[in-house]
Image (spheres, rainbow, N blue to C red):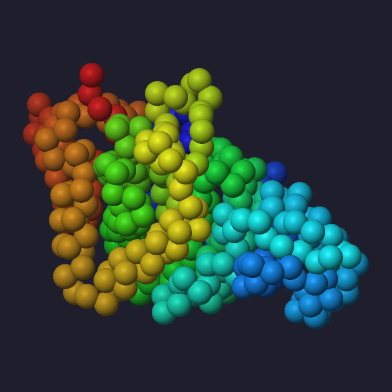
Amino acid sequence: MIFPVLPHNSRIKKIRKTRVEAGDPPARASDATDIRLGRIIRLLMEHSTVVVSGTKIAQEISSNRSEVWRLIQQLRGLGVDVAGHPATGYLLNSVPDLLLPEILNPMLRGTLFDSHLCHFYKIGSTNTTAMAAAADGAPEGSVFLAEEQTAGRGRGAHSWQSTRSAGIYCSVVLRPALPPSDVLVLSLAAGLAVRAAIEQVNQRANIDLKWPNDVLIADKKVCGILTEMNAEVTRVRYVVVGIGINVNHANFPEELKGAATSLRLATGSEWSRVELTAALLKSLDREYRLLIEQTDARQSILRRFTESSSWVRGKPVRVDENGSKVEGTTEGLDDRGFLQVRTGCGLQTILSGTVRAAK
């Protein structure tokens, strides 16, 4: 779910030293989902038409039948529809729409993100955890996924509310050999990746990109992107790209109904979060490889973002930037990815601030 006041600060958050905010400690590896749960689901999926004995499951996870029963009960408590009991064995009634590594890994083979997926049923913030992990040496391509966030973060001091198992709450660690000035282009590329993934799964969603970090449907926010980096003056140490997508939210609080939507509300049907997450990470892999491997990538990303956005050119906007207000009409992006606005005083470059449609 999105936050009531939608920030559009184009300045990528730059962190010299990773800090943990009070009350929002990063999750530890020991907090991650028990990998045996994913293995049980994978085994039951592989034998979807037969009952699997507790003994066989115990052998698969190197445990005992009483522990299998405890883990099955834990899965049921998480909403997984498992039939059966210790005397007869177990059968998966339906494939769970959980973003478990055991389900996603086979769909991501050959990408940057196929080896280091970490899943949490509940977490403070995937971005906070990813930043801490990156500072501790997490490899490039590490992915942090959560079913629920209790302290999800948007830009600035805004929170990102995360309904359990209704959205995609995902942060990835990247270590590009780029100057800090190029990270805004990476954020724009992430927006293109989100758009491509959504349209790959369902072309009925009419996606619009709002500079620099929002994905909209019918002028309502369906996705936000939060990019944070740790950098020196001339080089990036690491970047965390956080992506939050409203997928199967059935409703929003009254104060958000005019500003937020979900893919389910926009299309009238439930979406597979597993399918969309796989499409998202594959699309992000393509955009990232393009940026770091091809010399003309920056121009390609800026051109495609402009073509995909109704906000970048010819849009009357009002910008609140560092206490000042700017009104004018957008005239594209400069070669760094910053928004150009034609005002009564001439062409102005928007480096940061909240961009809204002018009334």
Left/right placement of residue 266 relative to residue 148 reads left
Left/right placement of residue 12 relative to residue 334 reads right
- Position above or below: 278 against 78: below
Residue 325, image quadrant: top left
**From where the camera sits, is residue 343 visible?**
yes
Residue positioned 88% across, 71% down in the render: 65
Residue 61, image quadrant: bottom right
Residue 357 in percent (x, y) is at 25, 27
- Position above or below: 317 against 187: above
In front: 83, or 221? 83
Residue 303 in percent (x, y) is at 15, 56
User: Where is the C terminus found, in terms of image quarters?
Assistant: top left
In front: 263, or 213? 263
Residue positioned 27% across, 69% down in the render: 291
Residue 276 in percent (x, y) is at 43, 56
Left/right placement of residue 349 relative to residue 278 reads left
Residue positioned 63% across, 67% down in the render: 48
**From where the camera sits, is residue 32 visible?**
no
Residue 271 in percent (x, y) is at 46, 48
Residue positioned 35% across, 64% down in the render: 283
Q: How many marks?
A: 0
